[in-house]
């Protein structure tokens, strides 16, 4: 991996619920300015890991270190103030408020002025392509619109690290194609992005580096092309024995 | 004109219009009506801060009302304070009780029905305690001796009281306008609409909800203190009884929660309705409350966003998500 | 303060008998909460209506409260069914906060209708056995317990057992448990969820009908009586664990005893405060109650 500053360090983080080990001893390092991805089959513990990083859950063991500061167990709002904002897999808009008002809540992290927050909201809406829907109620937006709103609200907090949880889920191919450049431009503007994604095309085209989670454990990491050829990853997604079958098919072709 | 300027301008207009009424008429009936209507507005607005903007429904707001009322009375009777000094102190006391109840409830993550129940329980506890201890006059209550003078906040004519309550209502309106146009208000409404999403973007829900309880309690306390000055009497039933709690919440809900003028509309509408019923059916015990209860059910059934909601009624925004 | 054994025993027995009735009241609330997941703020006022019903039956038509059971229980059942089906269900629009407000509205209307028709006087009834007492306990610490209270104790336990039987053994009970666990799944299986909800509410209020018949001979009624009971009932329910029948039963007995001893040591009114303090304490510190599961 590139030799840049480390923004987020996850050290041996684990979390169980009753008997279920949702996340087991996960360690990773997110470099500053990178666009990285967390992939894995359903139920692998990816969203749980995000909850642990952002403070919605507390790890049973391990540490989360943001820019050298131990933030393990911090509340989410404290982490937001320190520069880490997350979005949600199932979008969570302020349904009764307008797009502008939604984004303004995020903007208020850095300004107490209502007027300024509303202005910033308009600017951020522009960046994600919602400028023409600023006065619409969040509940009136399409799924794609709500995803953009979720993104915009998080962006308005001027995060150093943005945790995107399946920002492309529920979008049709056209909408995905429109969203990918938005995410890329966010990363290009200097925000470090860690995204959970199922849409492999997006992962391949966006991510510098990928971590693969399965059954709560990190089973592989590397560049997207390395990881997709990793036998364990193939097994995790497609089932036991698939990797061997694919290799045999390749060899006999 | 920006939203905040529009809000404050409308408040100013309202205050000027109402302030003129005592100058136009000396009719006791009219002034009494206006005074009690404004009183209803004040308690509805106070509830609206926590219930409408904060989304935390208190069923025991009389807790703060009674605190303000008893403080106002005790400060004068036991400590010889001037009522003009006692009033802000009573508000502060009610606000402190708000801080206590709010901090306790939100520290333990109470929401929804549980929060409503806890506020009800606290109000009942205060009622029973004030019924039992001599400090609050026990069941007999406390009575302020008659001594009319402006300095003693006992105005000879209703006009003085009308202007006093108008001032408190204006304060409540300003607080509401502040909620509509500030970071604190934006954070409060964010917590109301989606607490987790708010946390993710830097909002501290505990902090924000507790402060809302403080503001709401303080305003409610001012209504209590006002009541004591007008009627020169307070007892556990009046102070902490459910009547005031209900009137406050029904007024806000009927008028439109989370809006600037909703509680005023609702409170006035209910007050007019109550007056009409009294004229039609005479002084029947309980008839007022039957109306409040029925109106509450009807509004929740057919007009959840209250009267104010009619102004911006659009079929698509009828159903909220999640 | 030293109390001799008979006074303590008397307080204990009083507490248990009152507690059994609290348990019966709380059972109805638990059923409604467990299945509909709503906190029925109208529960206390409904009990008050039932009490007035029993009162009216006695005063107007001379029907003894215990004889009135087969009248009150079905009547309250119907009231509950209608309340849920016609009012609460329609007004909720699926939002919890609306249900909260609607049940509050219903309780206000009921309480004040009673005030209108019966005025605020506290009323009691006189029956042949109101003053009868029964001796309980060993020779050395014999206590006289009022017969109506003993009947209340027995009656409450019988009705509770019946309710639990209904839930465990009948088709309705199975339907109720299905809906409580998984509403959508139950609907897909062909269960009429709205009907089940209404039946549940009806059962909950039917318990109140029975409770009223047992309560009135030993107690009294006025329009405010509902308020006192509603908070006690809620305390029992949260203490026992929302949705747990065993919890409601044990919680009711416990609260009855606490109230009785509290009244003995602190005086009547402060004894009540003790209950509310417990209520607030449980809500804050252990909201899942003594028997509920942590969610």
Image (spheres, coloured by chain):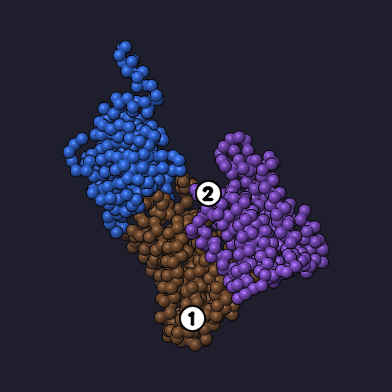
Chain colours: A blue, B brown, C purple
Residue A165 makes an appearance in the image: no
Establish whether labels 2 and 1 are both on one chain: no
* Residue at disc 1, secondary structure: helix
Residue at 45% x, 53% y: name it: B312
User: Exactly how many numbered labels are in the figure?
Assistant: 2
Residue at 32% x, 49% y: name it: A72
Instruction: Measuring from the top left, give residue A169's x and y in whole percent.
Output: 38, 35
The chain to which mark 2 is attached is C
The chain to which mark 1 is attached is B
Classify 10 Å Cα crowding around label 2: few (below 14), some (14-19), many (20 and above).
few
Residue at 36% x, 26% y: name it: A235
Residue at 54% x, 69% y: name it: B125
Instruction: Measuring from the top left, give residue A110's x and y in whole percent.
Output: 27, 55
Foreground pick, B96 / B288: B96
Q: Disc 2 marks which residue?
A: C293
Foreground pick, A53 / C103: A53
Q: Disc 1 marks which residue?
A: B74
Q: Quadrant of the N terminus of chain B?
A: bottom left
The reply, left or right, for residue A159 in relation to residue C139 is: left
Classify 10 Å Cα crowding around label 1: few (below 14), some (14-19), many (20 and above).
many
* Residue at disc 2, secondary structure: loop
Residue A127 vs B156, above or below: the answer is above
């Amino acid at each position: 991996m590139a030799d840049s500053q480390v923004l987020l360090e996850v050290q041996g983080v684990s979390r169980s619920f009753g008997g279920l080990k949702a996340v087991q001893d996960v360690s990773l390092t997110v470099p500053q300015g990178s666009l990285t991805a967390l992939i894995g089959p359903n139920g692998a513990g990816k969203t749980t890991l995000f909850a642990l990083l952002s403070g919605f859950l507390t790890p049973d063991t391990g540490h989360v270190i943001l820019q050298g500061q131990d933030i393990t167990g911090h509340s989410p709002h404290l982490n937001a103030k320190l520069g880490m904002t997350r979005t949600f897999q199932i979008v969570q808009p302020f349904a009764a408020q307008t797009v502008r008002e939604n984004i303004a809540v995020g903007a208020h992290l850095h300004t107490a002025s209502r007027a300024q927050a509303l202005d910033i909201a308009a600017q951020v809406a522009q960046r994600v392509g919602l400028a023409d829907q600023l006065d619409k109620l969040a509940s009136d937006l399409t799924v794609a619109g709500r995803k953009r709103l979720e993104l915009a609200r998080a962006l308005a907090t001027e995060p150093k690290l943005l945790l995107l949880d399946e920002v492309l889920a529920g979008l049709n191919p056209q909408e995905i194609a429109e969203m990918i450049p938005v995410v890329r431009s966010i990363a290009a503007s200097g925000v470090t992005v860690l995204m959970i994604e199922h849409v492999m095309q997006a992962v391949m085209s966006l991510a510098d580096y990928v971590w693969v989670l399965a059954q709560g454990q990190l089973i592989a990491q590397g560049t997207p092309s390395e990881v997709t050829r990793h036998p364990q990853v193939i097994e995790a997604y497609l089932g036991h024995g698939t990797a061997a079958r694919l290799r045999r098919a390749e060899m006999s072709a | 004109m920006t939203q905040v300027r529009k809000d404050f301008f409308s408040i100013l207009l309202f205050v000027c219009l109402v302030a003129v009424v005592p100058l136009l008429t000396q009719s006791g009936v009219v002034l009494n009506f206006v005074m009690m209507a404004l009183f209803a507005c004040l308690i509805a607005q106070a509830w609206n801060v926590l219930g409408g903007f904060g989304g935390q429904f208190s069923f025991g707001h009389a807790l703060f009302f009674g605190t303000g009322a008893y403080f106002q009375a005790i400060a004068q009777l036991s400590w010889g304070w001037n009522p003009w000094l006692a009033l802000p102190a009573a508000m502060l006391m009610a606000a402190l009780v708000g801080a206590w109840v709010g901090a306790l409830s939100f520290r333990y993550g109470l929401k929804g029905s549980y929060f409503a129940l806890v506020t009800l329980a606290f109000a009942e506890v205060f009622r029973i305690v004030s019924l039992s201890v001599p400090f609050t006059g026990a069941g007999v209550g406390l009575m302020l001796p008659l001594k009319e003078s402006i300095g003693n906040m006992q105005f000879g004519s209703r006009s003085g009281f009308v202007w006093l309550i108008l001032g408190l209502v204006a304060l409540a309106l300003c607080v509401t306008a502040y909620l509509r146009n500030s970071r604190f208000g934006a954070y409060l409404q964010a917590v109301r609409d989606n607490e987790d999403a708010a946390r993710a973007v830097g909002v501290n829900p505990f902090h924000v909800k507790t402060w809302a309880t403080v503001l709401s309690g303080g305003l409610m306390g001012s209504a209590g203190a006002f009541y004591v000055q007008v009627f020169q009497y307070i007892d556990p039933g009046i102070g902490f009884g459910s009547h005031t709690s209900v009137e406050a919440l029904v007024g806000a809900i009927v008028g439109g929660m989370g809006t600037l003028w909703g509680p005023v509309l609702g409170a006035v509408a209910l007050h007019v309705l109550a007056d009409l019923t009294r004229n039609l059916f005479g002084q029947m015990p309980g008839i007022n409350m039957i109306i409040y209860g029925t109106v509450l059910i009807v509004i929740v059934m057919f007009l959840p966003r209250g009267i104010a909601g009619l102004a911006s009624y659009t079929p698509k925004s009828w159903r909220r998500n999640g | 303060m030293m109390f001799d054994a008979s006074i303590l025993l008397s307080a204990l027995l009083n507490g248990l008998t009152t507690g059994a009735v609290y348990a019966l009241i709380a059972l109805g609330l638990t059923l409604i909460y467990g299945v509909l997941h709503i906190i029925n703020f109208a529960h206390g006022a409904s009990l008050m209506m039932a009490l007035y019903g029993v009162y009216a039956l006695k005063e107007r038509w001379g029907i003894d409260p215990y004889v009135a059971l087969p009248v009150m229980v079905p009547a309250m059942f119907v009231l509950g069914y209608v309340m849920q089906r016609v009012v609460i269900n329609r007004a909720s629009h699926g939002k919890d906060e609306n249900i909260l407000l609607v049940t509050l509205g219903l309780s206000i209307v009921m309480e004040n209708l009673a005030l209108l028709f019966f005025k605020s006087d506290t009323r009691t009834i006189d029956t042949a056995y109101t003053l009868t007492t029964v001796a309980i306990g060993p020779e050395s610490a014999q206590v006289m317990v009022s017969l109506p209270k003993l009947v209340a104790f027995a009656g409450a336990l019988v009705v509770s057992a019946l309710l639990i039987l209904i839930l465990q053994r009948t088709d309705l009970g199975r339907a109720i448990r299905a809906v409580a666990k998984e509403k959508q799944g139950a609907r897909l299986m062909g269960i009429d969820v709205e009907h089940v909800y209404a039946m549940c509410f009806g059962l909950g209020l039917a318990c109140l009908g029975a409770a009223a018949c047992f309560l009135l001979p030993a107690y009294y009624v006025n329009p405010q009586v509902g308020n006192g009971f509603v908070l006690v009932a809620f305390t029992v329910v949260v203490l026992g664990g929302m949705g747990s029948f065993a919890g409601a039963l044990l919680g009711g007995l416990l609260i009855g005893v606490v109230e009785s001893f509290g009244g003995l040591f602190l005086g009547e009114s402060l004894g009540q405060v003790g209950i509310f303090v417990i209520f607030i304490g449980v809500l804050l510190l252990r909201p899942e109650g003594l028997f509920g599961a942590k969610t």
